[in-house]
């Protein structure tokens, strides 16, 4: 197994073989892919713009299967381009399907939903909130690190009603999905696979958190105002010539809205689509233990 990155400073443990490669160089990629059965695209969304070069190199190198750079919200949802942040991935998927049509190269997209481990608001959104008139209480409650629950400060942010259900995935579960796909590539060929550990609403999370450790401060954010602020920030970034969107406030805000839009327009709740038979769904007891671990880990840091 070879793990390629654009930096020579990246380190990987044996038996993984590290490699530095220029993702924009078809010749470099062909050399890298030769002798490999599968390519897993685990780079950030910025790299998705290089999909045509990667796919062409994979075809010429004889790669059999590509796992696409999804690992996030449902990019196959017809409304998701409205969020702007997924446009690069959607375009990359379209180019992939065009290039592999009629070839032996197959693909699979792994849809994970929100990351339980990392969260969706890992950036400092304070300045953007303040600029758009959100209250000081909301500012103090916006989490940085554990989705909309901040166990260190014992705050929970409710976006909108709090009744919106969303599917969440642990990092090890995504890794398991990669193994499952490569273990049976024919079954998962040329389609998305949906994996998630928990599908729950914020209002369902709060009593569990209170049972684990009482005394949470609950704050409310108007989800429509939040979305409008995110779009304005996106437009301001566009006018300012911002090219790297991933680290921007607008990116985090629009991604968060995609989870908490009231009518599941962007497919944040995909519980009914989770791949059956692989043990991806965890029960409420396991959710409680996962939350307990999160809270406990925060209290010791």
Image: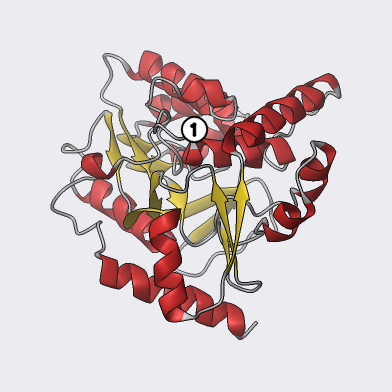
Task: Please indicate, yes or no, whether residue 52 appears anywhere in the rendered image.
Answer: no
Residue under pointer 1? 30
Within-10-Å neighbours for mark 1: few <14, some 14–19, many 20+:
many
Looking at the picture, does residue 144 appear above or below residue 103?
Answer: below
Looking at the picture, does residue 223 appear above or below residue 87?
Answer: below
**Residue at the far left in the pictured view:** 277
Residue 108 location (% of width, % of height): 31, 35
Looking at the picture, does residue 100 appear above or below residue 192?
Answer: above
**Image point (51%, 69%), residue name:** 13
Question: Is 157 or 173 nearer to us in this picture?
Answer: 157
**Residue at the far bottom in the pictured view:** 300
Looking at the picture, does residue 232 appear above or below residue 205?
Answer: above
Compared across the picture, whether 150 is left or right of 3 comes to right
**Image point (43%, 17%), residue name:** 94
Residue 10 location (% of width, % of height): 64, 59
Question: Is 182 or 45 nearer to us in this picture?
Answer: 45
The quarter in which the N terminus is drawn is: bottom left
Task: Please indicate, yes or no, whether residue 97 appears anywhere in the rendered image.
Answer: yes
How many numbered discs, if any?
Answer: 1
The quarter in which the C terminus is drawn is: bottom right
Compared across the picture, whether 204 is left or right of 30 comes to left
Question: Is 154 or 192 nearer to us in this picture?
Answer: 154
Question: In terms of secondary structure, where does tag 1 sit?
Answer: helix
Residue 250 location (% of width, % of height): 70, 35
Residue 189 location (% of width, % of height): 23, 32
Its colouring scheme is secondary structure
């Amino acid at each position: 197994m070879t793990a390629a990155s654009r930096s020579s400073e990246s380190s990987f443990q044996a038996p993984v073989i590290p490699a530095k490669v220029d993702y924009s160089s078809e010749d470099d990629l062909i050399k890298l892919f030769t002798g490999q059965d599968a390519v897993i695209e685990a780079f950030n969304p910025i790299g998705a713009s290089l999909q045509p070069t990667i796919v062409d190199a994979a075809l010429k190198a004889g790669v059999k299967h590509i796992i696409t750079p999804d690992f996030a919200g449902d990019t196959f949802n017809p409304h998701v381009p409205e969020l702007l942040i997924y446009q690069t991935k959607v375009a990359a998927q379209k180019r992939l399907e065009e290039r592999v049509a009629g070839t032996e190269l197959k693909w699979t997209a792994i849809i994970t939903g929100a990351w339980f481990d990392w969260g969706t608001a890992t950036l400092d959104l304070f300045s953007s909130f303040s600029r758009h008139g959100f209250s000081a209480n909301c500012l103090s409650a916006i989490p940085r690190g554990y989705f909309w629950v901040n166990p260190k400060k014992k705050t929970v942010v409710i976006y909108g009603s709090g009744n919106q259900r969303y599917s969440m995935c642990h990092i090890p579960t995504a890794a398991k999905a990669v193994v499952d796909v490569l273990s049976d590539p024919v079954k998962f060929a040329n389609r998305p696979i949906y994996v998630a550990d928990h599908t729950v609403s914020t209002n369902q999370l709060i009593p569990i958190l209170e049972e684990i450790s009482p005394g949470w401060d609950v704050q409310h954010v108007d989800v429509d105002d939040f979305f409008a602020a995110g779009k304005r920030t996106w437009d301001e970034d566009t006018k300012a010539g911002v090219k790297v969107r991933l680290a921007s406030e607008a990116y985090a805000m629009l991604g968060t809205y995609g989870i908490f839009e009231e009518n599941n327009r962007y497919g944040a709740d995909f519980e009914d689509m989770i791949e059956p038979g692989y043990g991806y769904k965890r029960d409420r007891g396991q959710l409680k233990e996962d939350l307990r671990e999160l809270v406990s880990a925060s209290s010791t840091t």
